[in-house]
Image (tube, rainbow, N blue to C red):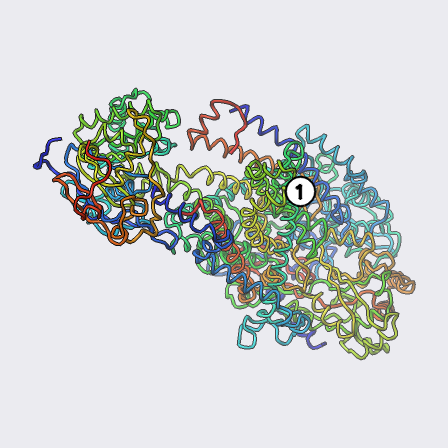
């Protein structure tokens, strides 16, 4: 980059120093149209997920069967058609956002909490603890995630909670690695040294100095992980290891409709699209965040 | 209900007739042959078949492909015929191994035994065919029969069904190299049917099994095991030294294609010639395709098994309440796309002992009747309803269990769904931690065959149910020779089971095998045990 | 360099011990076991069951079984499958060819799609073209694999009749659909890496030098920039290759592909502990060796890495 | 240097204005710059970091990164061709062949994954119709020319020291014997001893190849050593321009004066350094009047209101300062 612009953007940053860091990130994020579309979609999906039970009644509209109306093609009454038990696919897909999102989010949360804690400990304390943690991470990371998921769900039994546990467990290793790497880069910065110098406790240093400064790669990882957990959940559903019926989780809908993929393609099309749109949206947001949080990648 | 049943049966018959038209020559020839003149029949069989083929295709000579490819859905784990009773493995065993007696649609035909005699139902003498060689070159003789039964009795991996049967054989003795005598522990009217099961009692070579660990893969059949790759394919090649009629085809490959949709596509795409079990939702695609045909048959009986030791399903009144809250037709429509026959009693549709006219004995059939269901519920230990956990393994049963959940809710019974895999189920059963389980059982046509589910500690008695009267009646049936008297006893058995409802009969699934119209020579069988030994595909 | 390789291989030992123990443990807590499965829905007497447990060596406690297993493993023996009686190594060898071919083809598909898109994205950073190209690489990731597989089969096998719908007949033709199915799900990561790595490189001074020489943009990007951006791309591609080698069970199921992924799933369902553990150990080994090879490939791409290797056997830190 | 009016102009920049659109804001990097360069002439371009020197040079090669850079207006004429109108392919033919550039940091200007020989040879391959082998041979010759043994052609940049690398960069730039060489602070990143060697080399090669050269630097010493003419840039504008003598001995612009004042004077060490107060204005928000006015001790209200115009003191000496509209204005640093 040419030196003029470098110096000018330096002065730009100087000028906007009074703006908060968040506003600056938001400003950069806003410029990424794809990310904005993604964010909008994510908000819509979260909205639907949160208010799903206000919009629809679980017992009468989501899970109640109506054999007389089974396998209806999409029409005005049933926008996405009905499934083999005569349940409205449109309502099930909308309600399914709750199951799918919560599976994705909970799994990621588990990975985040465990992974971040271990990563922090490994990165901050180093030494033998780090070796142990990183070796364990290598072990878990070296088994392909989907296989690990299959093994865990098979071992613990099919249930939504176990699905979340399995997906959460498999995402731990990436959080450990990312957190550790980020902690390593900030560990020896002056402000951390300063904290140590004035005798702050280790916990205080980690929580008030180190973590806030390595959040950005973690935040990006969270959004991407939610997306991949949703896809992974659908994969496990395909193998019969997904959520318990009659929950309308998207992977379960997709998997249930797969025998009708030729005769009733709409049964897989809509849940498939729901997964696709959601995963795309989360990925777009993740990519946008990555760019916005890491200005050195941008001009 | 009856009309539907009749209709379905008619369809099956028609379909199987059409399907068998080309193979009919073999059948009729075989039917004509009686036990005494089996050798002649075998000789006569071949010219009859060629004759039929000649008249069929008088002008252009029909050429056949060297290989027939069959797409299957179930992985066959082992070629050990005593270890496996699944239909999918039966297809292969039927081609490579032969039993002493052959059973087809209600009749017996000689196979490795040319003739046999029965004395007082307890002693059977088989006169073995001479000059027959196993695939490894060893000669078939009485020693091999003795070895086969001994192995089944002693090998720990022998399938429980096989073991249960061989345990009814008290002893096998060799009279000479080609004569053996079986002594039974008790009279068994179904003995010959059991003996005909290739899966269990195809003859193994003592020499081969002693020489190699996988010696069990050598049989005497027209086909020799060639390639075994469980997740991909199992190939058998023609046994050119076969004692009977040689197949036209040189090689048969069973390709495992687990996804039903993909399997049917492979058939439509001419990648395979026969597609085992297309999904019911895609039967219409087969019907619409002018190149394809389908053989449909009713398969095993699908039950809700109740663990009678576990609350709340320990109470017969509670189970009856559930029975009268269930609508079988809805299950068939919802989970099977209508391709099934509602079950009314706990027996095979085609069994001689079938009985479902419960009104005649002062009972009523299970039909959805919420008032009656609530009556029974009120009589039960759980008048305010309860929670029942339904355990199941496969995809289709996932829908069934949801339908049951929906139906039973109407009488205040809550259903928890417990999806598991077969290992999980095995563990639950072992630890007795389950309440209701969805499964199917396939019975033979023999009158006693459903006993294995209902006698105390029977092979498929998952329920832990035990009824002294039923045990007694089954025992009597096995020895009773008067057909009418036997039927009366079967009636009583089914009526007792109906009253107690330890297992609720839901439906007989209508299964299908789709195939290219160029395929001929398959022996379609109404229980689903198809024989592909003489399958051939026109070029 | 040999010392470096040796060191990396030695580092695998604790990982393999860990992996095998984890799997042994998981399979142990899984409900049911091979004996109960063999019994199926039938009843057996306690003696029969006991005999079976003894036959499979399952009557011993977990630590004993595990130590015995490890003892055999030390002698290079992966054991014999409890489900089929075949040596695990033989079962693996019979299937790895198909899996490896599929993995190579999938990563190739991923590379063919994502590297050009990633480059276009980077070159047009921040523009609509960037958005569209990034979107393109994300698309494959968002479509559940098995669904895409089924749709591809319907379109290309059934409707168009161009390609076989299933199985591995050893031809390229039979590879295409499964490779696309897996490959498209890999494009997101590879495209993203290509883009950011190219962005790092694209504003470097040396590209300006090349432009000042009078080179066209094509030369600047494809000859100079891409080669410099290659290391992270190689890393991700290598990881993806190792990953697909390790597990593409879903696609293998849809396409009836006779690979190791399906064997592994079947073995998990069949509670075949020896096979599951053996397969995962082999996968871990192969995956690590591939990543090691990729590391060594850096040297081929970047003379600076080469110099570092030549200078010392010290551990390379990225 | 004596005036030679008839000498051919190899480069002429007229009314060049370049801006950068960064994050929705406009950075005015180069404003209305006029420059011309005769064959064989060396022009020094002086100014602080961020004054627009490099952008001007890049514009001459049409290498201003776009986006975000936009050449708003202006003509650039190289050897009688207006390159602003040329299609991209034609422009690529000119780069490296007629006009070359040496960049500031030799550590980053070479492709780390290609041998230096290949990088020089690439220049030949791009502009001459010769085989690869010939190009490699010529590249080795070129290495010798810049004082590097030819055997080292197969080595990679990381095996060279900074000074050596800059020699390689010079070899690349001079490979096709361009008529114009732009050297953007070629010695800033080097050790002082190496600086002298590299400068010496450049001077020699310039004579040998008879090129015109623009030497971009903020080091007035280098200007004095190698340049015939000098242009002083401030905030994207040329504020003073003339022969070396004009600018050094007859300084007119307050900014130029400031530059000289901030240099330590070895002859008069008692004199205190007088740095220019303040900082260069934000290029996204240039003042309405003279950009230097806020820091200029001579500034009047008029300076802040009005863009300065060019005042020609002689045929060669130009100053852009409003103050000279007043009769008798002069800055402190008088003629020397």
Residue nearest the observer in this picture, D2 or A3: D2
Residue C108 is left or right of residue A148, and the answer is left
What residue does disc 1 label?
A203
In x, y percent, where is residue B397? 69, 62
Residue nearest the observer in this picture, A297 or B355: A297
In x, y percent, where is residue B225? 63, 44
In x, y percent, where is residue B116? 79, 53
Residue ID at (56%, 49%)? A221
Check the residue under mark 1 and report the chain it is in: A
**Secondary structure beneath disc 1?**
helix
Is residue B23 visible to the viewer in this orientation of the structure?
no
In x, y percent, where is residue A222? 57, 51
Is residue A156 visible to the viewer in this orientation of the structure?
yes
Residue nearest the observer in this picture, C169 or B162: C169
Looking at the rendered structure, the number of numbered marks drawn on it comes to 1
Residue nearest the observer in this picture, A222 or B61: A222
């Amino acid at each position: 980059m040419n030196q003029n612009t470098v110096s000018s953007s330096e002065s730009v940053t100087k000028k906007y120093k009074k703006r908060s860091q968040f506003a600056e990130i938001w400003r950069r994020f806003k410029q990424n149209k794809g990310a904005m579309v993604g964010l909008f979609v994510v908000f819509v999906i979260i909205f639907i997920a949160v208010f799903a039970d206000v919009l629809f009644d679980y017992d009468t509209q989501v899970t109640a069967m109506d054999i007389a109306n089974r396998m209806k093609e999409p029409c005005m009454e049933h926008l996405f058609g009905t499934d083999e038990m005569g349940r409205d696919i449109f309502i099930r897909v909308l309600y399914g956002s709750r199951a799918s999102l919560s599976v994705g989010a909970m799994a990621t949360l588990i990975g985040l909490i465990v992974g971040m804690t271990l990563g922090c400990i490994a990165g901050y304390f180093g030494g033998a603890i780090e070796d142990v943690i990183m070796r364990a991470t290598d072990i878990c990371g070296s088994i392909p995630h989907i296989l690990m998921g299959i093994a865990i769900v098979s071992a613990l039994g099919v249930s939504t909670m176990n699905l979340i546990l399995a997906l959460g467990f498999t995402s731990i290793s990436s959080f450990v690695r990312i957190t550790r790497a980020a902690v390593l880069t900030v560990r020896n910065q002056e402000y951390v040294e300063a904290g140590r110098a004035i005798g702050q406790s280790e916990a205080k240093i980690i929580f008030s100095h180190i973590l806030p400064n390595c959040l950005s790669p973690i935040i990006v990882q969270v959004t991407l992980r939610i997306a991949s957990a949703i896809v992974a959940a659908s994969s496990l559903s395909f193998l019969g290891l997904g959520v318990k019926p009659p929950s309308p989780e998207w992977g379960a809908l997709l998997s249930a409709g797969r025998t009708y993929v030729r005769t009733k393609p709409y049964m897989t099309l809509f849940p498939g699209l729901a997964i696709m749109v959601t995963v795309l949206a989360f990925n777009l947001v993740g990519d946008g965040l990555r760019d916005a949080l890491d200005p050195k990648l941008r001009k | 209900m009856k009309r539907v049943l009749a209709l379905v049966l008619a369809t099956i018959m028609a379909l199987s007739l059409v399907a068998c038209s080309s193979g009919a020559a073999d059948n009729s020839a075989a039917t004509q042959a009686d036990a005494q003149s089996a050798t002649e029949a075998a000789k006569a069989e071949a010219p009859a078949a060629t004759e039929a083929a000649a008249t069929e295709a008088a002008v252009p000579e029909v050429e056949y492909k060297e290989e027939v490819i069959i797409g299957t859905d179930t992985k066959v784990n082992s070629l050990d015929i005593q270890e496996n009773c699944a239909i999918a493995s039966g297809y292969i065993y039927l081609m490579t191994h032969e039993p002493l007696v052959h059973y087809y649609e209600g009749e017996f035909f000689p196979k490795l035994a040319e003739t046999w005699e029965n004395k007082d139902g307890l002693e059977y003498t088989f006169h073995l065919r001479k000059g027959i060689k196993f695939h490894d070159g060893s000669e078939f003789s009485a020693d091999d029969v003795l070895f086969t039964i001994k192995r089944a009795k002693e090998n720990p991996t022998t399938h429980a069904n096989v073991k249960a049967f061989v345990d009814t054989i008290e002893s096998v003795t060799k009279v000479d190299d080609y004569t053996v005598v079986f002594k039974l522990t008790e009279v068994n009217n179904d003995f010959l049917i059991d003996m005909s099961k290739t899966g269990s009692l195809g003859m193994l070579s003592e020499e081969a099994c002693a020489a190699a660990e996988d010696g069990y893969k050598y049989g005497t059949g027209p086909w020799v095991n060639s390639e075994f790759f469980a997740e991909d394919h199992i190939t058998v090649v023609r046994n050119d030294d076969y004692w009977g009629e040689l197949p036209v085809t040189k090689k048969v490959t069973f390709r495992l294609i687990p996804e039903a949709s993909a399997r049917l596509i492979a058939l439509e795409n001419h990648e395979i010639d026969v597609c085992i079990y297309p999904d019911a939702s895609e039967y219409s695609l087969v019907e619409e395709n002018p190149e394809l045909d389908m053989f449909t048959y009713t398969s095993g009986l699908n039950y809700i098994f109740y663990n009678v030791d576990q609350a709340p399903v320990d109470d017969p009144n509670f189970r009856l309440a559930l029975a009268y809250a269930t609508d079988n037709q809805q299950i068939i429509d919802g989970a099977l796309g209508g391709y099934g026959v509602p079950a009314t009693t706990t027996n095979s549709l085609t069994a001689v002992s079938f009985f479902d006219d419960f009104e005649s004995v002062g009972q009523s059939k299970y039909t959805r009747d919420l008032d009656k269901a609530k009556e029974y519920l009120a009589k039960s230990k759980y008048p305010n309803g309860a929670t029942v956990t339904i355990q199941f393994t496969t995809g289709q049963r996932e829908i069934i269990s949801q339908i049951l959940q929906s139906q039973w809710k109407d009488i205040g019974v809550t259903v928890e769904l417990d999806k598991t895999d077969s290992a999980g189920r095995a563990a639950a059963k072992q630890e007795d931690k389950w309440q209701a389980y969805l499964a199917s059982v396939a019975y033979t046509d023999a009158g006693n065959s459903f006993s294995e589910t209902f006698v105390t500690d029977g092979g498929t008695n998952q329920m832990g149910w035990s009824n002294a009267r039923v045990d007694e009646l089954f025992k009597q049936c096995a020895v009773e020779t008067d057909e009418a008297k036997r039927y009366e006893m079967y009636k009583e058995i089914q009526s007792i089971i109906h009253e107690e409802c330890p297992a609720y009969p839901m439906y007989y699934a209508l299964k299908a095998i789709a195939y290219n119209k160029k395929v001929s020579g398959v022996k379609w069988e109404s229980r689903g045990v198809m024989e592909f030994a003489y399958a051939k595909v026109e070029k | 360099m040999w010392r470096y390789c040796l060191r990396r291989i030695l580092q695998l030992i604790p990982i393999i011990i860990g992996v095998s123990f984890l799997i042994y443990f998981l399979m142990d807590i899984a409900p049911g076991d091979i004996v109960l499965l063999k019994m199926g829905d039938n009843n057996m007497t306690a003696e029969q069951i006991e005999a079976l447990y003894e036959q499979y060596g399952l009557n011993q406690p977990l630590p004993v079984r595990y130590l015995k297993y490890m003892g055999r493993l030390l002698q290079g023996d992966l054991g014999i499958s409890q489900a089929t009686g075949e040596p695990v190594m033989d079962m693996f060898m019979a299937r790895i060819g198909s899996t490896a071919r599929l993995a190579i083809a999938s990563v190739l598909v991923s590379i063919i799609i994502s590297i050009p898109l990633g480059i276009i994205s980077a070159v047009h950073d921040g523009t609509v073209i960037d958005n569209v190209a990034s979107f393109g690489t994300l698309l494959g990731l968002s479509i559940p694999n098995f669904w895409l597989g089924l749709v591809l089969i319907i379109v290309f096998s059934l409707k168009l009749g161009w390609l076989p719908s299933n199985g591995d007949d050893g031809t390229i033709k039979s590879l295409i659909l499964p490779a696309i199915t897996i490959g498209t799900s890999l494009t997101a990561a590879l495209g993203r890496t290509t883009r950011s790595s190219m962005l790092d490189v694209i504003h470097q001074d040396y590209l300006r030098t090349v432009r000042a020489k009078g080179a066209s943009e094509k030369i600047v990007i494809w000859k100079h920039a891409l080669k410099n951006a290659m290391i992270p791309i190689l890393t991700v591609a290598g990881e993806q290759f190792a990953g697909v080698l390790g597990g593409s069970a879903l696609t293998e199921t849809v396409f009836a592909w006779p690979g190791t992924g399906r064997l592994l799933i079947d073995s998990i369902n069949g509670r075949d502990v020896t096979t599951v553990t053996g397969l995962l150990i082999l996968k871990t080994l192969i995956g690590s060796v591939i990543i090691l090879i990729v590391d060594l490939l850096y040297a081929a791409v970047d003379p600076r890495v080469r110099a570092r290797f030549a200078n010392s056997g010290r551990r390379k830190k990225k | 240097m004596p005036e030679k009016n008839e000498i051919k102009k190899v480069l002429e920049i007229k009314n060049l204005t370049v801006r950068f659109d960064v994050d929705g804001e406009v950075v005015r990097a180069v404003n209305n710059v006029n420059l011309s360069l005769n064959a064989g002439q060396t022009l020094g371009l002086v100014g602080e970091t961020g004054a627009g020197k490099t952008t001007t040079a890049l514009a001459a090669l049409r290498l201003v990164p776009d986006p975000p850079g936009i050449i708003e207006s202006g003509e650039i004429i190289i050897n009688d061709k207006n390159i602003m109108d040329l299609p991209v392919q034609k422009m690529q033919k000119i780069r490296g062949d007629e006009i070359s550039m040496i960049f500031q940091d030799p550590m980053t200007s070479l492709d780390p994954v290609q041998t230096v020989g290949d990088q020089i040879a690439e220049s030949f391959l791009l502009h001459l119709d010769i085989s690869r082998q010939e190009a490699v041979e010529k590249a080795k010759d070129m290495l010798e020319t810049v004082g590097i043994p030819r055997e080292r052609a197969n080595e990679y940049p990381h095996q060279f020291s900074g000074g050596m690398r800059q020699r390689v960069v010079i070899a690349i730039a001079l490979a096709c014997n361009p008529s114009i060489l732009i050297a953007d602070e070629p010695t800033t990143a080097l050790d002082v001893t190496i600086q002298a060697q590299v400068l010496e080399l450049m001077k020699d090669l310039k004579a040998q190849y008879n090129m015109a050269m623009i030497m971009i630097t903020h080091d007035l010493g280098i200007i004095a050593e190698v340049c015939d003419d000098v242009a002083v840039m401030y905030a994207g504008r040329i504020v003073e321009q003339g022969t070396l003598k004009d600018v050094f001995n007859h300084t007119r612009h307050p900014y130029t004066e400031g530059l000289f004042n901030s240099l330590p004077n070895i002859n008069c060490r008692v004199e205190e350094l007088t740095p220019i107060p303040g900082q260069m204005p934000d290029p996204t928000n240039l003042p309405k009047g003279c950009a230097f006015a806020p820091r200029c001790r001579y500034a009047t209200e008029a300076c802040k209101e009005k863009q300065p115009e060019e005042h020609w003191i002689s045929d060669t000496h130009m100053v852009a300062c409003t103050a000279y509209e007043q009769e008798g204005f002069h800055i402190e640093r008088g003629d020397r």
